[in-house]
Image (cartoon, helix red, strand yellow):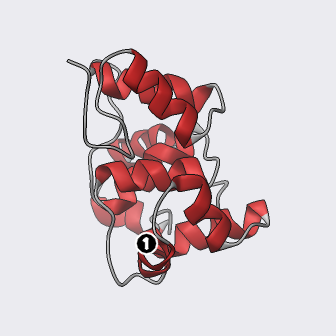
Amino acid sequence: MLDERMTEDLLKKLLASPTPQDYLDEGLTTATDLSTYLFALLDERGIKRADVAKAAGINGTVVYDIFGGKSKPGRDRAIMLAFGLSCTFKETQRVLRLAGVSELWPKNRRDAIIAWCINQGMTRAQCDDELWKLGEKTLLGTGALR
């Protein structure tokens, strides 16, 4: 499930199709929701939701509700979940997309810092340190230096 075809490849196939139905008939679309994806990541990494909650810095009840599909995380919580799951940049973007929030955008200063931290394999706490050091709002806190 986690090793799906690249969006760019699918887009090329879609745009080359004579009709949308021809593309749809190939069965290349998916209906993955956030909960399903989070559980797949959890299973792939062999960790528990409690571990994710602790690493993400999010209350366990909130994490269980998100995993259970009872609630959707806001953007910062989705990013924190991605850190808690030790997601790659690509996986983080997918978590954000499935959460219905905007993906990390490297033209945005704060997003660029977060993306860099993810790419470096940092923890959420280490990312917050970088954000704080560079005067940006941290994921866990509400303040910024500037």
Does 116 appear above or below 118? above
Residue at the image point whose x is 57% and y is 32% from the top = 126
Question: In which quadrant of the rendered view does residue 143 lie?
Answer: top left
| 122 horizontally vs 96: left or right | right
Which picture quadrant has residue 62?
bottom left
Rendered residue at 34%/61% (across/down) = 99
Amino acid type at circle 1 is: Asp
Residue with the mark numbered 1: 33
Residue extending furthest toward the left = 146
The total number of labels drawn is 1
Residue 6 falls in image quadrant: top right
Residue 54 as seen in the image, left or right of residue 16: right
Which quadrant holds the N terminus? Answer: bottom right
Q: Is residue 79 above or below residue 65?
A: above
Task: Return the x and y of residue 52 as percentages of the image width and height.
Answer: 61, 62
Taking 77 as reference, is 2 left or right?
A: right
- Residue at the spot x=54%, y=27% of the render? 117
Q: Nearer the viewer, residue 52 or 112?
A: 52
Q: Position of residue 67 (x, y in %)?
A: 49, 76
Going by the image, does 80 lie left or right of 71? right
Q: Between residues 74 and 40, which one lies in front from this camera angle?
A: 74
* Residue shown at 27% from the left, 52% from the top: 101
The image shows residue 63 at horizontal and vertical percentages of: 48, 72
Q: Is residue 31 visible?
A: no
Q: Is residue 120 above or below residue 8?
A: above
